Amino acid sequence: MLSLISYLRTAIPTYAMPVALLIVIGLFGALAPVFLTPANFTAIIYQMSITGIMAVCMTFVIMTGGIDLSVGPVLATSGLVVFFLLHIAHFPLFPAVVLGILTGAVTGAISGLVIALFSLPAMIVTLGMLSIVRGSALLAGGPDLHLVREQPGFEFIGNGFLFGIPFAIWIFVAVSLLLIFIQKRTTFGLQVAAVGDNERAAYLSGRRVKLVKMMTYVICGMGAALAGIIQSSQVHTAAATYGEFGTELDVIAAVVLGGASLLGGKGSVARTILGVLFLAVLNNGFNILNVPIDYQLIIKGGIIVIALSLTEWANSKVA
Amino acid sequence: MSKQILLEGRKLSKTFGRFVALQETDFAIHAGEVHGLCGSNGAGKSTLIKILTGAHRPTGGEVHVNGTLAPAGSPLAMLELGVACIYQHSNLIPALTVLDNVFLGRPPKTKLGFIDATEQRRKAEALLEKYNIDLDLDAQVSTLATVKQKEVEILKALALDAQVILMDEPTAWLSHSEVRKLHDTIARLRALGVGLVYISHVLDEVFQVCDAVTVMRDGAVVWNGSIDEITRPELVDRMVGNDLGEASRSVAAEPRHPKGTGEILLSARDLGMTNTFEDISFDLYKGEILCLTGLIGSKRTELLHSIFGSAKFSAGTLDVLGRSVRYSSPSEAIAAGIGFVPEDRLRDGLLLDHSVSDNLIFAALDKVSRWGFWNNRAVRELTERQIRDLNVKPADGSKIVKRLSGGNQQKVLLGKWLEIEPKILFLDEPTVGVDVGAKAEIYAILRKLRAQGTAILLVSSDMEEVMAIADRIAVMVSGRMTMTCAADDITQEELVLQISGGNK
């Protein structure tokens, strides 16, 4: 019995999420057969691509022991920036999108710089950034929706299909693969985890800890900006109010469900994708089953807390 | 003097994995007695103290207070039984007043549950009078001199009705006149029947204030008795051990190389850091081991960090490999060929949640990557080479470092720095908490490096270690370098004297 418990403990961090995912899929499939159709799976992945891109890009930030609460307003801002560039400045599509993503890089760089240089808590700095970016977006864009018209290239980003699969999914897959590559195949990947594990040891080993930290926020900002462009394209509008309160919490929940520790050190881009998938499956299944939104929220919150408690329990005893 | 036993440890043992920190140790403190506890670092003193205060649960044996069995491993229970400990580092809250600190956490309360300020003050004043301590109860702790802060801690212990007070290196941060004041206070406590344990490396102090003394070595008591029954050289002998450990014996046989090849690789002149150290001048030669020794708090670690770029010196000049330098970060020092095995391997050295391999490559990423992309074969080869050369056990590069023994962790940390192929290597207490076998292996590696022409600057408080592997020895006392000489020109007894600042 004891050995079974200790075996479960060691197994939880690795297998709990995939197993839970299979159980939930099985459950929804049994209750509503339509859930198991390929079309529905495509829909799930399409729905998760925006949160997914933000989550994989936030994984590094959380692995360093940081957090970025400003992704919602950054998402809104990049949509606005691209709208202005396309409609008012009449930029071609490609540079407009690149500059839109760059907005995210800049806001991320500012947060990262302040956090790294002055050793301030990321929670506070990005909370401030959340307010500053939202305010700036409202200042520039006002409270109105801005319709994006007659921009077939732009509309393709969020609504087009490539080889029968939505283009947004391709983007999500490409970003995920890129980040998995960075994590597994570059020294930067190790340095990110090392900063979260023991920042002082990393510094004393000659690593440029502040630069590494700052770069993670740049990546996170770029992810949020890209997500903003996709969302803008999907709904044909840009607005300063997009990425409302709660966006960042979904993203963080996904990363943490993927096994990343908010204390830093642990985390994996690939597992973050599992976390996003898990939340997306829950949303989709609840909607198919017509579960009212209030119950959805309560059940989702409960599952997140239980999942994290289990992981904590497993980690604390094995360590 | 009453001879009632206040606190007694019976056959106390403590093991950490396979490492035996304490074996079957008996220890007793009588009322009205100041009991000295002596031994080198790693002798088991702090383990014993931690068991007596309940911070550690012993693997075997019992703790008795006033003749009754005390619950094991409960700091709160030991406090309630009247056993208090004053640690080297202050446990006070600097922003609060003396009075608030003394009753912190357990103030006298009124019937409504609020803090009873009048009663609090009355109690404190009674204690001050009884023990003849001079303290301003309303002063903010941060404004007090260090010795006064120690007295606040003593008062805090007395407010808990402490019968036994353990003091761990209480004078490490005190000046000479302050030490005398503290000793006066201790004498008054003793006269009123408190039992005190006095841990100190400074033998002068032990002979000044202690009535009895217990000497520990390698986790066991090797001598105890009245202070009148032992002379100072005998005490040193007992601390050090007549038979040097296996590790140092093999090493001690080797010839020394003072000043190595004669080529100076690092030269410090009048280095100073405000309020920390001053006027530090020394040369480090190619192919020598220079041991920098001294007491805890003599600022040796701070000196190393200031050279390495992880802290800044505020005065003086530093030449490394013939160039005047002042590193603003460790990465610059590393680029110049300096490696640094820091003192606290858990806090400053290792990525505990990472693998042996990740740790080994971490200071030399350029060697195993190109344009930031891993060269997996180079990573594997480096890992295998270091594991083989350092005899890391288990020989598995994917093993998480946290799960290794202290000795193996230290080897991994050393291996990380060997990979930058340092021309100059700093090591800060590299064998603390390392078992004898691993110690011998680490010494062998250092000797090999020396033979290859590395200049080694080793900080150590372990006299046995210093005498065994040093080519030259430098001593720091309270932020000053008071002596530098060839290791053959000094005996261990003279060295112990030098370290405690006694120039007799």
Image: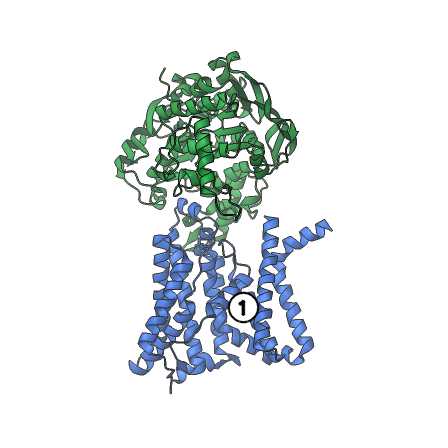
Percent across and percent down for residue A159 are 47, 82
Residue A203, horizontal then vertical, whole percent: 40, 47
Residue drawn at (56%, 70%) of the image: A279
Relative depth, front residue between B284 and B102: B102
- The reply to whether residue B84 is in sight is yes
Q: Residue at x 45, y 35 (%)?
A: B122
Q: At 59% from the left edge and 50% from the top edge, which residue is drawn?
A: A316
Amino acid identity at mark 1: Val
Sort mark 1 into few (<14), some (14-19) or many (20+) by Cα contacts within 10 Å.
many
Q: Residue furthest bottom?
A: A150
Q: Give the residue drawn at x 52%, y 25%.
A: B194
| Residue A283 as seen in the image, left or right of residue B474 | right
- Against B304, residue B368 (above or below) is below
Q: Nearer the viewer, residue B170 or A21?
A: B170
Q: Secondary structure at mark 1?
A: helix
Chain ID, mark 1: A
Chain ID for green: B
Q: Which chain is blue?
A: A
- Along the line of sight, which residue is nearer the eye, A212 or B371? A212
Q: Let me know if residue B371 appears in the view.
A: no
Q: Quadrant of residue B180?
A: top left
Q: Nearer the viewer, residue B239 or B212?
A: B212
Expressed as whole percent of the image width and height from the top left, the position of residue B429 reads 45, 33
Relative to residue B163, is residue A318 depicted above or below?
below
Answer with left or right where residue A128 lies relative to residue A186.
Answer: left
Can you say whether B313 is above or below B259 in the image?
A: below
How many numbered discs, if any? 1
Identify the residue under disc 1.
A276
At which x and y percent is residue A98? Answer: 36, 72
